[in-house]
Amino acid sequence: MNEFLETEENIVRMLKTVFDPEIPVNIYDLGLIYKIDLEEDGHLSIDMTLTAPSCPAVDFIVEDVRMKTEGLMGITSVDVNIVYDPPWDKSMMSEEAQLELGFL
C-alpha cells in the first residue's frame, strides 16, 4: 500500500479514538471532521467543528486530536482548526453513529 494512503488511514483510525466526553460516539463518526490535509513534509491540518459552538470540552477534544495524531509515523506537525461553517447537524453523522444515538 502507498505510504501516504497508509498514513491517512492511520489518521482516521486515530480520530475514531477521540470522543466528546458527553457523547458516546467518536468525533469522526459524528461528522465533526470537515477536512484532513496532509502535506508531503508531514504537516497535518485538520478542520473540525463541534456539536455546539459553546462546547465546554473544546480544549480537551482539540488536545486529544493533536496528541493522538502527532504520534503517528510520518506526521511532523499538527494544526487543528475549529470551524463553524457549515454548521454541524445530525445529518452529518454516519449511519452507525445515528443508530448508536437512537436517531434511526
Image (cartoon, rainbow, N blue to C red):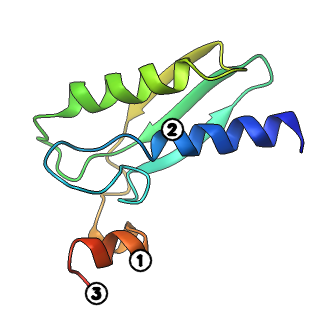
Is residue 34 shown above or below 93?
A: above
Q: Which residue is mark 1?
A: 95
Q: Is residue 28 above or below residue 38?
A: below
Label 2 crowding class (10 Å Cα cut-off): few <14, some 14-19, many 20+?
some
Q: Which residue is label 2 attached to? A: 14
Q: Dividing the image into 4 quarters, which one contains the C terminus?
A: bottom left
Asked if the residues shown at circle 1 and circle 3 are in contact, with their CB atoms under 8 angstroms apart, the answer is: yes
Give the residue at x 80% y 24%. 40
Q: Measured from the top left, where is residue 29 in percent x and y? A: 41, 59
Question: In the rendered structure, which amino acid carries the disc numbered 2?
Answer: Met
Q: Is residue 38 above or below residue 102?
A: above
Q: Earlier in the sequence, mark 1 or mark 3?
A: 1
Circles 2 and 3: CB atoms closer than 8 Å: no
Side of 50 where 35 appears, left or right: right
- Calculate the distance from the C-alpha at mark 1 to the C-alpha at mark 3: 8 Å
Q: Badge 1, how many Cα within 10 Å: few under 14, some, many 20+?
A: some
Q: Amino acid at mark 3?
A: Leu
